[in-house]
Amino acid sequence: MSEQQFLAEPDLQFINDIQKSGGGDLKKCFQCATCSVVCNVTPEDSPFPRKEMIWAQWGQKEKLMSDPDVWLCHQCNDCTANCPRGAKPGDVFAGIRSAAIKALAFPSFMGTLLSSPGLAIIAWGIPVVILLAMISIMPGFYSVLPHLNPHSFFGEMFEQFKNPGWGNMPSGPIKWSNFYPELGIDLTFLTLATLAIISLAVGLVRFWNTMEKNHGEKGLIETPVYNVIGTVPTILSHDRFMECDTSRNRYYGHLGVFYGFVGAFVTTGLVMLSLWVAGIPTPYTLSEHGVLTVIVKVIGNISAAAIIIGGIVLWAQRASFKKGSSSYFDWTLIVLVTGLGVTGLAAELVRVEDLRSIAYPTYFIHLVFVAYLFLYFPFSKMAHLAYRTVGMAFARTAQRDMVTEEEIA
Amino acid sequence: MENKLGVYICTGCGIGEALDIEKLTAMGPQNGAAVVKTHEFLCGEKGSQIIQEDIKDEGINTIVIAGCSPRVNFDVFDYPGSLVERINLREHVIWSHTPNDEDTQMLAEDYMRMGISKVKKMELSEPHIEEDLTKAVLVIGGGITGMTAAIESAKAGYGVVLVEKEDKLGGFMGKLHKKLPMQYPYAKLEDPGVEAIVAKIDNDPDIKVYTSAEVGAIAGQPGQFDVTINTSGGAVNAKVGSVVLATGWKPYDATKLDTYGYGEFANVVTNVQLEEMAKNGKIVRPSDGRPAKNVAFIQCAGQRDPEHLSYCSSVCCLTSLKQAMYVRQQDKNAKAYIFYKDMRTPGSYELFYKAAQDDAGIFLTKGNVTSITEDGAANVVVEVNDTLLGAPIKVAVDLLVLATGMVPTTADEPILNLQYRQGPALPDLELYNGFADSNFICFPYETRRTGVYSAGAVKMPQTIAESIEDATGAALKAIQVVEAAAKGIAVHPRAGDNTYPEFFLQRCTQCKRCTEECPFGTLDEDEKGTPQPNPNRCRRCGICMGACPERIISFKNYSVDILGSAIKAIDVPDEEEEKPRVVAFVCENDAYPAFDMAGINRLQYNPNVRMIPVRCLGSVNTVWIADSLSGGIDGILLIGCKYGDDYQCHFAKGSELANYRLEKVQETLDRLALESDRIQLMQLAINDYDKIPSIIEEFMERLDEIGPNPYKGF
């Protein structure tokens, strides 16, 4: 049957969702298409954001969930700055992306948890509880692995009960593994990472399938993997951010945070390799470990600095937004990024300065941030890293995102 | 009264340098002037003093002022009790022709002769004031427009008779659930508040209200209308001075809209029916009485559609936006769809549109409705394509609302029931789809019946806010006309003119051309067909004068004889001199000012044209054409306003009638083997002044081809 393909009836709840996550002005759009004209990153053929704006107005959830263009947008806010009606397409797109991450979330309650400001306490409470629980069972590990330091957090706590006051921490140099042994750390976070990767993979497959279904067979080129790889130069170079007129500073902010995380990832990898392959536990000292110490310290500290500076740039950019606002979803990510950097660096400083009274609590807070990041990667704005990559890859597969590629080349 | 002529020539503004003033001065005594004076600044204090003194000391009572256009300094050269003729030496002579040229000088001299010969034939006019005048205003229609007109007239101190067909005042406004916002930010619906307005009228002793009543007849003229009001208790008579027609609109007959499922599906209603439901407290599905949650609106249902109403009713988009708000207020999870051809929300209501658009549950798109069907649950299923979303839309709704349009009450009823020779209704309303409009682009509220002013939705589709403004304007016009009648002067466009047409009835042949052709229905007839003037209905255009084959209609300062003498005053050179002469009858309303503007802009045109200003091209009597031709004039131009459906004629029919008459003359000329091209009518809008040189030049070239008038020299 070759019946006409009608649009779905509007999903009022979906409209409310977008409005709540930053797209409050979406109904103001009167389809003049100024946004699509001023956008520097849209493909020329059937450009965004105009068409997405009316889909959003008409609650076309399915269409927007399966629209790669939503992810080609880098939220420059050139559209928002130039919108004659104050409809803020940049924010609407952010709202659509939040709603998409929420809708594609697996398990789906996680989407709700991460997108509801009212549930923030629970969202932050879960990593705290997990970490406390993990730390509390640490003593069991010590019996299995006696070569590791036998101190435990609760042992320390016990000491403190005997001698109240943070000043009575165990003697000797501050050592994180006294608090949370390496094996415990790696088991905890590798588990969280695995769960996150599974969740994310489900979300991404759903996303790809829905895009494919909506797009239809026509015009798809059969090289998805190649196209995922094809997005890498764009992502690494951050070229798209350079296309922005209105918020050019985001390029530096995002670049700092992005490479800061890459550096942090490399540092962690080096430490893990040296522990589990070469059997060298932390902390490293220059006299004992030489080059390894230099490399780890240099990369680690530069990364931390990049994350903090980038985070502050993004933070300042958001705070001073005259054009375009920011939602809970956005702010959570910025708080998380900046918090990660700041607590990481602070933990290092208090350790070096031997500020025993606040050293372990600082480290604990840092771990909470890390756990939050791992645990919620697929459901928070952090997931944009994956969804955007897949969206861009699909656009390439649909031979859609090529024009700007050429321009960049 | 003996005419004593004074001729005053202004030499300012370059006139003195461009013309031989001595020669012009010498023309005074030759033409019987008692006094001839020149002054370099006649419109200045000393200049006008000279004239004042001559009036006082010399007994001058007939004044010719040769200088600038009569359209300027009319306040300076105002001498009550004296006849004044202005000769336009500035704009029409020296500013538009070569200075100190023989042809320019001849032009100026011709104008001097023409002006003097005209004024010598004029007489001072005394206003004609009827007896038993009344200043009360009859307002027909008790909706918001009529009520406002009544209140405003009464506030200004004029008695009002208000006639309403229904049993209570309020009209459509009284049937509304909410009305559109009336003030910034134009976002929130308001209570109609019709009760307060009705109470104001009830408490006003100057307003006499007849409900359940209709106007049976209106006879007479402004200041003296005799109105018969048919009430439930029998006929009542009232005397009024003017009429405000505010009978509004009625909804388009929805039974003709079966293609939209009206009458076929239970849950298809009109916007008027929805309003009624909302007013009664609940918007429901007629099929089962359950609350309507999802509602679709189709705009332009039977509008902008050659099969139904060809026009836009201007308020239905706003009404649907408003009613969509009702739907959303009834249930916060409701959806309201509006499918439109074009969303039209005039003026500040753009803000209202934005307010509705901001509601998450109001869905707006342009589109073509392709199918309306019913599903098993009596939902109406609407399919729309060519939408803004780039794909067709299908929605199943509880209720489909058709935004039907406004039909003016004047479309099929005369309403006024005028006891006029030309019939009971306003004429030619088919030009405006039955609306009581006038296409008087510069004269809102006017109808083609003097003293009758239309306002509100009977004039054109409009909102309550516009109707209130409209009603106020119409009330003012209604007041103006009774005051003008009291002074015996004309209302626009010759406001203040105290002349009026006089009929030398002994020579009337009862041909009825004047009674038929008057665009304003001024003239009634007795049984024999003799015209019976009603001076207060007259606009003083002179179209009757142009029509009359017996030339028995004249004004004291404007007649066939007066203008005929001007034509005869033109000095026609011999054929050998190769100086053709053209007479141009130029409409005072737009064409004459256009020539002034040409002068102001120093546009140069052929100096062989002699302009004669006329009140309206319709007042041009064909005898002037015969006079011109027999006097050796080579060509004749009639320059006036545009005619046709989008006419600009200030007297509605004047230029069209002139053209009709001219065609007859041209036929006659062709029969006599004279070149009909010698006579042409040209339509000139006021902003066409820059085309004047080429228009004249083309005509002169054509004349050149035809050759000189064979009657020249006879």
Image (cartoon, coloured by chain):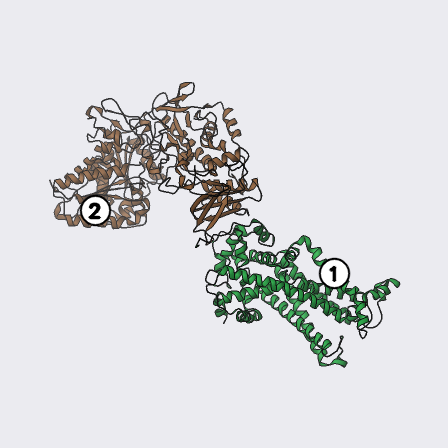
Q: Position of residue A111 (x, y in %)?
A: 63, 57
Q: Colour of chain B?
A: brown
Which residue does the numbered mark 1 point to in the structure image? A128
- Residue B314 image-quadrant placement: top left
Are the residues under badges 1 and 2 in a single subunit?
no
Q: Nearer the viewer, residue B435 or A26?
A: A26
Is residue A401 something that shows in the picture? Answer: yes
Relative to residue A149, is residue B397 drawn left or right? left
Relative to residue B80, is residue A4 drawn left or right? right
Task: Determine whether the residue tagged by mark 1 lies in a helix, strand or loop.
Answer: helix
The answer for which chain carries disc 2 is B
Q: Position of residue A100 (x, y in %)?
A: 58, 58
Mark number displayed over residue B595: none
Relative to residue A340, is residue B131 drawn left or right? left
Quadrant in which the N terminus of chain B appears: top left
Which residue does the numbered mark 2 point to in the structure image? B608
Q: Position of residue B709 (x, y in %)?
A: 14, 44
- Are there few (<14), some (14-19), or many (20+) residues within 10 Å of tag 1? some
Q: Colour of chain A?
A: green
Badge 1 amino acid: Val
- Residue A161 image-quadrant placement: bottom right
Q: Nearer the viewer, residue B578 or A403?
A: A403
Badge 2 amino acid: Asn
Quadrant in which the C terminus of chain B appears: top left
- Residue B65 image-quadrant placement: top left
